[in-house]
Image: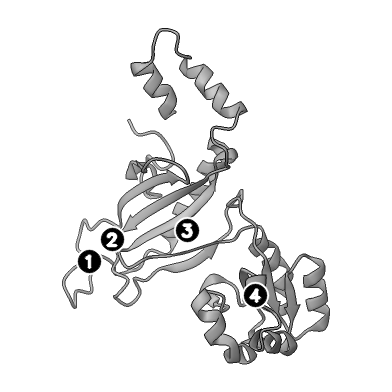
Amino acid sequence: EQRAAYLARRGKADAPTPEQVKEDAANNDYRRMDETVELALQLNVDPRKPGQSLRGSLALPHGNGKTFSVAVFTDDAKVAEEALAAGAAVAGGASLVESIRDGSTPLSSFQRTLASPEMMVELRSVARLLGPRGLMPNPKLDTIVPPEELLGALKKQMSGMSNYRTDKEGIVRLGVGRGSFGCDKLLDNVREVMNEIQSIKPESFGKGKKGQKKVAKGTKYYLKAHLSCTQGKGSVIVDLRTLDPTSSFFMSEPL
């Protein structure tokens, strides 16, 4: 869209038409790599205050274009065997925890973890190894699940379950797909992200005065939004009216 608009304004007489540019972008690679498209959303929250540090995970309708190797912690030998058959990098119970502790199973062999609740006691012994790398199972990320749900959760994690959290400035950065997805799939993923962020909106938010509990009338939850890609020059600001699920212009073009 940007290339077409630029050529329409400043292109030479023999420059391709906007329709030709769009067709070329749809049929040919624009860059040498399939770029990740990222949404950066600045929220009016202060992560230092109780209840305003937002964190979670969600499965995007079309995935995020990434695949992950997953370790599954379960004391059920049958479930562990099924997890390995389904594609888990490693799976097991106390013996797997011990192999991580003594280094025979390197932490580099998996990128995400899943665990059944009864394994959390065993995992305490390797928390210092897993925690700093963001590999400790966490209920907020839906990575602690009942044994009967482990295989379903494994499939989601391997296909690119997206984790998010606010940084110290209250910004959430989340990859919403690859450039090859096309506009429709990317928009579907953005819609899912925005509905998720809206659903976890804290009752009290805003960077107000210390001790202020109520949200002042007219306080905005969304402050800014930008889209960027891996090799792009800078980012593109997005009209918040098109991203706010409470707006009548949500996921549409404002007048």
Mark 2 closeness class: few <14, some 14–19, many ≥20 residues within 10 Å: many
- Identify the image quadrant of residue 167: bottom left
Disc 2 target residue: 44
Question: Mark 4 and mark 3: span between their CA atoms?
Answer: 22 Å
Say what secondary structure mark 4 lies in. strand
Disc 3 target residue: 196
Say what secondary structure mark 2 lies in. loop
Disc 4 target residue: 114
Residue 229, position as x, y percentages in the image: 46, 44
Identify the mark nearer the N-term, 1 or 3. Answer: 3
Q: Measured along the vertical axis of the image, is residue 121 above or below residue 43?
A: below
Amino acid type of the residue that numbered disc 4 sits on in the rendered structure = Leu
Pick whichever, 98 or 216, lies toward us: 98
Q: Measured along the vertical axis of the image, is residue 221 above or below residue 7?
A: below
The coloring applied to the image is one colour
Mark 1 closeness class: few <14, some 14–19, many ≥20 residues within 10 Å: some
Disc 1 target residue: 207
Say what secondary structure mark 3 lies in. helix
Question: Mark 2 and mark 4: span between their CA atoms?
Answer: 32 Å
Amino acid type of the residue that numbered disc 1 sits on in the rendered structure = Lys
